[in-house]
Amino acid sequence: MDTPKVVLGVSGGIAAYKACELLRRLTESGHDVRVVPTASALHFVGAATWSALSGHPVSTEVWDDVHEVPHVRIGQHADLVVVAPATADMLAKAAHGLADDLLTNTLLTARCPVVFAPAMHTEMWEHPATQENVATLRRRGAVVIEPAVGRLTGVDTGKGRLPDPGEIFEVCRRVLARGVREPDLAGRHVVISAGGTREPLDPVRFLGNRSSGKQGYALARTAAARGARVTLIAANTGLPDPAGVDVVQVGTAVQLREAVLKAAADADTVVMAAAVADFRPETYAAGKIKKKDGKEPDPIVLVRNPDILAELSADRARADQVVVGFAAETDDVLANGRTKLRRKGCDLLVVNEVGERRTFGSEENEAVVLGADGSETPVPHGPKEALAEIVWDLVTQRLS
Ligand code: CTP
């Protein structure tokens, strides 16, 4: 593709300032971005900022540069339109096809995928009028990202925050690369664990592992894009919450087990992508363990942690629940994977080879997905999201 053309629509909410970060990410990753703010958006961030950051003139009205017919051309030439933040008013106008400024005209003339990232107060988001407008837009094929939960304007907290700009960027990137996915996980609840557990020795030390959590987050993002309600149990990842995903933070294997089992109670699928410590220190020192001069260190005694994947597979909350595990192996990758699949009792096991420079922390992965039914699906080297999509393809086959 030539340089992808993106229209960044900005409507009038305080989160407009976060759209500057989204704009930077889009331009720095090679997109040609035309910013179309509403007149109200300019109360929050001025035209000079949008123009300087995008390298294009900025207008809110259809009356500027009329000879170029901007109210038609901008939408017609776009590969993607993303509206961030999308206010309740903007969603209502888009749902009803109103066209009283340049952005709303652009939305009517665009034939490319459209992403809305709403931001507003919780009451406005939950109002039936807004919810019906969102449902209308989604039914027509637009991607409407669920708002995040957190601090809103002023002292209020709740659902309605604009998701992290990096996460909106990821949604845009995915939609540009693959178009709008069929929401084949709509109505499904999926639970994903991600990251690596940490087992504390004392207040400053722990036994941990090198899992970054990126594969689990890719699974969460792609499941949300395919319409699922997603609960992500995150262990020590330090990554921003994926847009439209409920995130539960945990630290240890025992906490991870508790959170996963609770969320799994009404889940259609559970994917254990987290690297869970098999052992934890038998004792936790309430104060920092000190070295004693001239003495050998005390040995660390370990006890076993529960095997969450085996437990989930054996005691399924629902008979038709699909349980997926991951296995990171350094040797005899496939043979070890097959043995592990049987031992854990899950339906699918994603087996990948790890090493010093492979998989951990990287953006890419390569794997084979083994099925309890004897199937074997090789996944070539590629982005973690591509592997995630294949996992969901295999899960949806089993769900239906
Ligand atoms: N797992 C789990 N609970 C544990 C250990 C692992 O649920 N206590 C899950 C992981 O989330 C992963 C799968 O089991 O989905 C395989 O993890 P792995 O560490 O490869 O399995 P182990 O049972 O620890 O096997 P090994 O003997 O290779 O250490």
Image: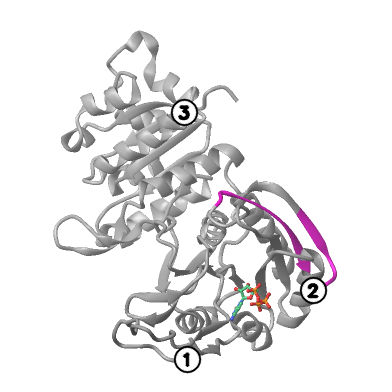
Which residue has dot 1 on it? 282
Furthest-front residue in view?
Answer: 294
Which residue has dot 2 on it? 372
Please state the horizontal and vertical placement of residue 355, each as a whole percent of the image.
64, 58
Residue at disc 2, secondary structure? loop
Q: CA distance from mark 3 to mark 1?
A: 53 Å
Please state the horizontal and vertical placement of residue 53, each as a whole percent of the image.
31, 27
Q: Which residues are magenta?
A: 362-378
The residue type indicated by label 3 comes to His
User: Would you say residue 177 is visible in this rendering?
Assistant: yes
Q: Which residue is depicted at the point 41% across and 71% down?
A: 248
Residue 292 sits in quarter: bottom left
Residue at disc 1, secondary structure? loop
User: Would you say residue 400 is visible in this rendering?
Assistant: no
Mark 3 or mark 1: name the one nearer the start of the chain: 3
Mark 2 or mark 3: name the one nearer the start of the chain: 3
349 lies left or right of 312: right
Front tag of 3 and 1: 1
Tell me if residue 364 is in the magenta stretch. Answer: yes
23 lies left or right of 185: left
Q: Which residue is depicted at the point 53% across and 31% down?
A: 111
- Crowd class of label 3 (few under 14; some 14 to 19; many from 20; radius 10 Å): many
Nearer to the camera, 392 or 39: 392
Residue 152 sits in quarter: bottom left
The residue type indicated by label 1 comes to Glu
Q: Which residue is depicted at the point 47% across and 28% down?
A: 30
Task: Confirm or reject: label 2 Cβ below 8 Å from ligand 1.
Answer: no
Above or below, 189 against 115 in this view is below
How is the structure coloured here? one colour
The residue type indicated by label 2 comes to Ala
